[in-house]
Image (cartoon, rainbow, N blue to C red):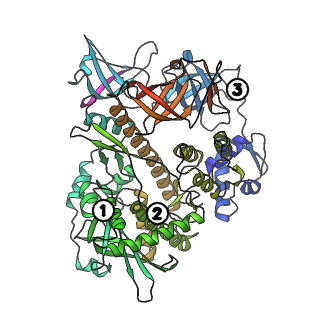
Amino acid sequence: MKKEIKAYFTKHPSIKIKPRELAKKLNAREAHLYEKMKVVLFGLYKEKFLDREGKRYFLYSDDKQKNFTGIVQIIDEGKYGFVVLKNSNIKDVFVAERNLGTALNGDHVEVELFDKHSGKNREGRIVKVIERKYKEVVGKLIKSNSTSFVIPDQPDFHRDIYIAKNNLKGAKNGDKVLVGDIVWNDRSTNPEGVIKDKFGKAGSYEAELMNVAREFNLNYKFPPKVISQANKTSAGISQEEIKNRLDLRKKVVFTIDPDDAKDYDDAVSVEELKNGNLSIGIHIADVAHYVDEGSPIYKEAYKRANSVYLVGSVIPMLPEKLSNNICSLVPNEDRLTFSVIVEMTKRAKIVGYKISKSIINSKRRYTYNEVQEILENKSGEFFDELNLLNQIAVILRNKRMKVGSINFHTPEVNFTLDEKGVPIEIKIKEVKDSHKLVEEFMLLANQIVAKHMSSRTKDVSPMVYRVHDLPDEEKLKEFASFVKSLGYSFNPGAANNSKEFQRLLSEVEGREDDALINEVAIRSMAKAVYSSDNIGHYGLGFKYYTHFTSPIRRFPDLIVHKLLLNNIKGNQPGYNKNQLENMCEHCSAQERNAINAERLSIKLKQIEYLKNKIGEEFTAVISGITNFGIFVELRETLSEGLIRLRDIKDDYYLFDEKQYAIVGSETGKRYRLGDKIEVKLIRVDESKREIDFTLLN
């Protein structure tokens, strides 16, 4: 809510408004939301972001203040920068190269404003680096004669780091290394550092994995205390424990996962009842049974908040003994679970549900491909159960679409690696009915748990929700303008109802610009996050939604299990609202961090795959346009690269921002966002993480 309030006042800098009026503007009329809003308003007043007269709040004026703190964004390898101020209504402060001092991109700095300024931004100089963004840096060691430098892998760390001879710690020329104790006090010299760790030769699979992990502060290794506790955890299940659970071991239960999955945290079942209805079970690994609050495993899981899936490797949230063994729903082994058992008609109308601790014994570990083959061939082990589940999943999906769920089509890539981790093939993943089958029942369970807890905990006990806010108005207008340039209509005023997005995406499905429009649509959306306040999930069209179905790889799911169990037992929740909100913010931040790490891992493998294909020709789609070039995405591998305007020789091209195009000044030739073009690969720079193409006539 704080973000929305700040955005509102920034957008309306001259407004003076009472809390009640603001609540109407922000759709925060419900009592608990209104009370929270008043607390946030007062906090912003104390932070001097807002001022007030009587009951009316308005933007605080910074006219007399000279020094501010914020985060510096370095542009064009240090040629200039901007400081994004904290708790201020002043627009980003421009800092010329000579006034950057020893600041690096992302540093927390103090900036002094100049009295005079020209242009739309205030100008200033950085007087102090308060905190470095990078405490440690990964890079390649280059030794030349008696001098050694590390070239950082992070593109925004724009200075090489000098390493004194006594700080090399045995590292050799060409090694991928970790540098710490970085000191930079004089802009006329290079930063200095000490080598803390060595990962092997730069370019090797292990070195590059460690590189990504370090860049995003991901820890491959678990602390000794965590490993020790995991090793002491017993897989044995006592008769007393079984007595207190719903015993489903004789039921036909199975898992459906990707071919390369190591942990299985969800299973499904279906059976026909005597009354003609169906009993559908969604059975989730009972991780909470093995992970006590405050234990070393719990603390480390919270710190990580999720598993991170890099190309060819995973950094798990839980130690392997739990994630791949004790908690994993492997076939033919008794496993503790938390089950949501739903009674529904054969038209997927929910009659009732039961949530219970349970014990299962999975009868089969299926892959998506195996299930797809059984469904297509109409035969195979447990065909009747799979076919019935698939029929219900189709109905659930259709119902979901009718209430406004947005069906994004976002292609993903799959890599085939050789024994050294080198990519030898990249394919676009195919989404089949078997994937959709599992997805629908996980969505159903998450929805039921959220609604169940909401109906029992309002104003009494806190809960973790997965929420997705309405899109920003300005972003919607930009999106409408973008799709209009491609010949489609989109009404931003109607987009509060997600069906407007749904209509457009259905219209473009299967067309050449399908993937591009989906990608830009996603960028126009708010990000889904975890919150202790339920505002619903815009993208799914759900009033109630949480994450319950993946506790092996997501910490919020583990917390939801604990909250749910306490609720069922009638116990206190174990967490107060402030604790939960802090957890939600941490888990949301860690999720974004994991997504960025996964994206970089994919990009690096795409670069590695293409480096031996210089001179080859590809079909591509224009995915971005700037004043210095056009970004293109290869259709076969989803690899993105740049065609620089200076490399287009047939004309002098100008950037037309309104039309999302570049236009030849003499010929009038036009290249627009979404156009399909033929390109040639001319350069791959692994150190800068860049791919360059040129246009083919």
Identify the residue shown where x is 59% and y is 48%: 525
Q: Which residues are magenta?
A: 185-201
Identify the residue shown where x is 74% and y is 39%: 13
Q: Amino acid at mark 2?
A: Tyr
Helix, strand or loop status at disc 1: helix
- Which residue is nearer to you in this view: 397 or 41? 397
Decide which of tag 2 and tag 1 comes sooner along the chain: 1
Q: Amino acid at mark 3?
A: Lys
**Do the CB atoms of the residues marked 2 and 1 lie less than 8 Å apart?**
no
Identify the residue shown where x is 46% and y is 63%: 575
x, y percent for residue 384 = 35, 76
Q: CA distance from mark 3 to mark 1?
A: 60 Å
Residue 370 marker: 1
Residue 120 marker: 3
Position of 369 with respect to 331 (left or right) is right
Helix, strand or loop status at disc 3: loop
- Which residue is nearer to you in this view: 588 or 420? 420
Helix, strand or loop status at disc 2: loop
The answer to which quarter of the image holds residue 200 is top left
User: Does the rendering let one see residue 155?
Assistant: no
